[in-house]
């Protein structure tokens, strides 16, 4: 690591899929070919050539020539491309824009991409035009892009190597990029270190040659003890998600740069203990039990997210003693539970559990004896929280009278009537539904005594 008092090493960045999340030529093709019947095929072919070139499977010169031949772009397409690329700067680079502006004199962008779209994007980060080394387009009289300047060394195989030689940089050089041509600078002895930049794409053939792998630019700054926006790189924070929470959870964590491991089902205590080491954030639903033994084994745990309403599956006193924050999702299943509860009320009132097997056996039991509509019946709701109160509204909408009881003072919704005691509610109710939590006071809550009051 460099002495922080010494000058910063020269940092040489690739542009496509490193400084930005995307490949500039691929995006230009997508813009230029809009409305063309073969757009998808041509864009796909250009992207395939890009990937093969970046992986070192074909030479840069061949890849570039074939892509430009497929492009069909015009000068007028460059402005919308630049505007698009300005929204596609890699998240961790955008996050640390102040670093780039402060050290712009030590930063170069060396790319086989094109100056016309690179220069205006990196200018926002304080990088001067003289520190952008890239190809340039050639145009015909009508403004159509016809190719690239053949005199530019970056249009040829080994161009980045030659470009670095021509710079004559007077200090150590660190290269950050996602492509094989970036590694070749290190291979030629012109860089002290090559960092495979994988925030946007990871190419195995490139990663295999890297001195270090950078999931984000935050990691680079952290390793070199340089000023950074975050106090700690998110890519070092491990998230373990169990029991299939909504896919957006993993997407959001990954988008922010966290390490994410997903396990489809729940884990028993021993299985969770085996996986919890190094995990900072644990996401569960109701099946997985977070016991004191699990908490004891969790050496880096800072937060538990319960993707459900209840937290009975978590040792809350143990988490509090360990300083682990616990979050639940009190509104996550509210509507689902309400619809299910109302559906079960209708099913039971209409004696469908008795009739359904007969129908499946080919017997048409037309009798409605003992079957009732729920309209006009009284629903007794015990527990008037998020679920109970919403069920109250929906039940009234289908014609039920609603009475409710809660140990806490809760304002009624609609025409629901509050009962002061359970004994007041039960004699009135045709149907009783319980929406209470698992606290010790609620154990054995409803029994023979309560049934006798109905």
Image (spheres, rainbow, N blue to C red):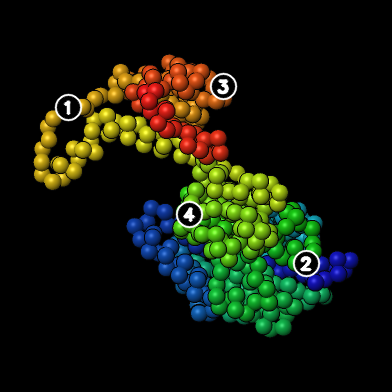
Comes first in the chain, label 2 or label 3: 2
Return the residue at label 2: 224
Q: Mark 2 and mark 1 in contact (Cβ < 8 Å)?
A: no
Return the residue at label 1: 369
Return the residue at label 3: 409
Q: For the residues marked 3 and 1, what is the alpha-carbon distance in whole angstroms? A: 40 Å
The mark lying in front, picked from 2 and 4, is 4
Return the residue at label 4: 243
Q: Quadrant of residue 185?
A: bottom right
- The residue closer to the viewer here, 229 or 427, is 427
> Residue at the spot x=78%, y=67% of the render?
224
Q: For the residues marked 2 and 3, what is the alpha-carbon distance in whole angstroms? A: 57 Å
Asked if one can make out residue 190 in the rendered structure from this viewpoint, the answer is yes
Residue 279 image position (x, y, % from top left): 63, 60
In this view, 404 is above or below 324:
above
The mark lying in front, picked from 3 and 1, is 1
Element at label 2? loop
Residue 206 image position (x, y, % from top left): 59, 76
Q: Mark 1 and mark 3 in contact (Cβ < 8 Å)?
A: no
Q: For the residues marked 2 and 4, what is the alpha-carbon distance in whole angstroms? A: 38 Å
Quarter of the C terminus within the rendering: top left
Comes first in the chain, label 4 or label 3: 4
Q: For the residues marked 1 and 4, what is the alpha-carbon distance in whole angstroms? A: 43 Å
């Amino acid at each position: 690591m460099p002495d922080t008092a010494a000058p910063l090493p020269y940092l040489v960045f690739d542009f496509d899929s490193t400084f930005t999340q995307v490949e500039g030529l691929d995006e230009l093709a997508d813009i230029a070919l809009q409305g063309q019947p073969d757009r998808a095929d041509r864009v796909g072919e250009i992207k395939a050539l890009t990937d093969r070139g970046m992986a070192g499977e074909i030479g840069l010169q061949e890849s570039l020539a074939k892509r430009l031949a497929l492009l069909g772009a015009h000068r007028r397409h460059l402005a919308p491309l630049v505007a698009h690329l300005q929204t596609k700067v890699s998240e961790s680079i955008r996050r640390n824009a102040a670093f780039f502006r402060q050290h712009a004199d030590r930063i170069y962008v060396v790319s086989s991409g094109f100056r016309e779209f690179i220069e205006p994007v990196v200018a926002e980060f304080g990088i001067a035009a003289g520190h952008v080394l890239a190809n340039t387009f050639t145009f015909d009289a009508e403004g159509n892009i016809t190719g690239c300047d053949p005199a530019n060394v970056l249009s040829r195989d080994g161009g980045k190597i030659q470009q670095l030689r021509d710079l004559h940089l007077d200090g150590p050089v660190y290269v950050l990029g996602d492509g094989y041509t970036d590694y070749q600078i290190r291979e030629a002895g012109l860089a002290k270190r090559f960092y495979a930049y994988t925030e946007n794409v990871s190419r195995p053939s490139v990663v295999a040659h890297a001195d270090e792998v950078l999931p984000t630019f935050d990691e680079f700054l952290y390793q070199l003890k340089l000023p950074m926006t975050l106090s700690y790189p998110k890519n070092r924070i491990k998230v373990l998600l169990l029991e299939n929470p909504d896919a957006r959870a993993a997407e959001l964590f990954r988008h922010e740069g966290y390490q994410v491991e997903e396990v489809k089902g729940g884990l028993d205590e021993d299985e969770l203990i085996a996986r919890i080491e190094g995990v900072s954030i644990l996401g569960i639903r109701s099946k997985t039990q977070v016991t004191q033994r699990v908490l004891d084994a969790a050496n880096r745990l800072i937060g538990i997210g319960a993707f459900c309403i209840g937290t009975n599956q978590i040792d809350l006193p143990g988490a509090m003693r360990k300083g682990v924050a616990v979050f639940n999702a009190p509104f996550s299943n509210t509507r689902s539970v309400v619809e299910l509860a109302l559906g079960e009320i209708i099913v039971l009132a209409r004696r469908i559990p008795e009739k359904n097997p007969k129908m499946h056996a080919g017997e048409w039991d037309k009798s409605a004896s003992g079957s009732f509509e729920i309209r006009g019946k009284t629903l007794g709701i015990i527990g008037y929280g998020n679920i109970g109160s919403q069920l109250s509204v929906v039940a009234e909408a289908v014609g039920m009278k609603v009475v409710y009881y809660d140990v806490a003072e809760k304002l009624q919704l609609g025409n629901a009537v509050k009962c002061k005691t359970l004994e007041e509610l039960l004699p009135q109710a045709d149907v009783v539904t319980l929406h209470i939590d698992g606290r010790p006071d609620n154990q054995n809550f409803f029994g023979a005594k309560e049934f006798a009051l109905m």
